[in-house]
Amino acid sequence: MKFLDLAKVYIRSGSGGNGCVSFRREKYIEFGGPDGGNGGRGGDVIAEAVDGLNTLIDFRYQQHFFAKNGQGGMGRLKTGSDGDDIILRVPVGTEILEDDGETLIADMTELGQRVVLAKGGNGGFGNAHFKTSTNQAPRRANPGLEGVERTIWLRLKLIADVGLLGLPNAGKSTFLAATSNARPKVADYPFTTLHPNLGVVGVDGAEFVVADIPGLIEGASEGKGLGDLFLGHVERCAVLLHLVDCTADDVGDDYRTIINELEAYGGVLAEKPRVTVLNKVDALDDELREMLKEELEAAVGGPVMLMSGASQEGTTDVLRALRAQISEDRLRRKQEEDTGEDEPWQP
């Protein structure tokens, strides 16, 4: 299944049904009077966050969503039926924006969350509604209100606890494959990862979600490489895992390249907690490891961990460091779900 994180959608709610002008005409009833019914209400356009989706690919093949119109009123005081609503099922973490692509309408961050994007028009009154003691035979009815038509953008930002950062071939996909059941593409050339991947990792009885995004290069904020649009998928993360390839010519320069792109992207992404790791250390001896670690710590201004995703050396320590940065609310929720299944049955 292809990955799509941005889609333009055209929506329109249903128009209300027209009111009816009708009079009761039956044998043996001398004064029938008005009996025109009201029109039905038009359907709404609703967005709902559902489980089991992690892409907007469905909106690539269908961009127009029109709710049904309400039925017109009929004689014998029959009210027209309401138009059916139409529901846009989107992944959790989807932002709904106005046509300008900037104004936020809704942020679908919770499973089951529903937002009315376009409200259906009300049905018009039939002539029976206008009957009074002084106007016993009204010959007027209201038309139904028109539906709302608008253009919106859907932008997906994945819900994850940890976001992986690094230059192409820094070992992000290898780390995700080594610590979770995810199977991202792994190869020895740059830009192997072309779209984000999610994996659930566990350590010390706790589980959290890790998001792997395509690698950044210098000038990504200006559109070079795959650009920096994928950084939106790690905006919701609690902590960032920055992997630096120890086989690079200058590990300090590689680290600063990513930091500069985070700052150019803007927002609070550059201020998020980060765990910096020198990756692929299985290719170095002990002396070279310490030398490169000191060099990277000087650039970071803080501690640096050593790891190898291929040999899984140091991966457990890195997971524990990430777990310490994640709020207990997320971890506790997962633990409660796990322990609840293991509790013995009681009447």
Image (cartoon, grey):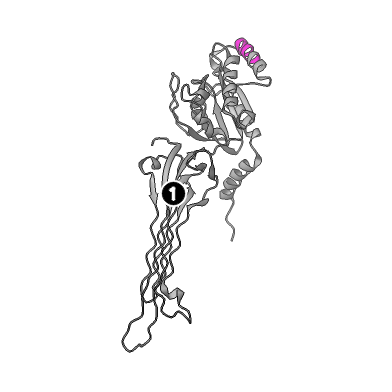
Residue 216 seen in this snapshot: no
Is 239 rendered above or below residue 258? below
Which percent across, then down, holds residue 273? 64, 30
- Residue located beneath label 1 in the image: 88
Residue drawn at point x = 49 percent, y = 21 percent: 168
Q: Which quarter of the rendered picture does the C terminus lie within?
A: bottom right
Which percent across, then down, holds residue 21? 37, 72
Tell me which secondary structure the magenta stretch mostly adopts. Answer: helix
Instruction: Please identify the residue farthest to the left as the structure is shown.
Output: 27
237 or 150, nearer to the observer: 150
Q: Amino acid at mark 1?
A: Leu
Which percent across, then down, holds residue 156? 49, 39
Give the quarter of the image for residue 321.
top right
Magenta-highlighted residues: 286-294
Instruction: Please identify the residue farthest to the bottom as the structure is shown.
Output: 28
Residue 222 seen in this snapshot: yes
Is 138 rendered above or below residue 290? below
Residue drawn at point x = 62 percent, y = 10 percent: 287
Horizontal side of 277 relative to 1 (left or right) equals right
Element type where label 1 sits in the image: strand
Give the quarter of the image for residue 67.
bottom left
Which percent across, then down, holds residue 268? 62, 32
Residue drawn at point x = 38 percent, y = 86 percent: 31
Q: Residues within 10 Å of mark 1 (few under 14, many from 20)?
A: some
131 or 200, nearer to the observer: 131
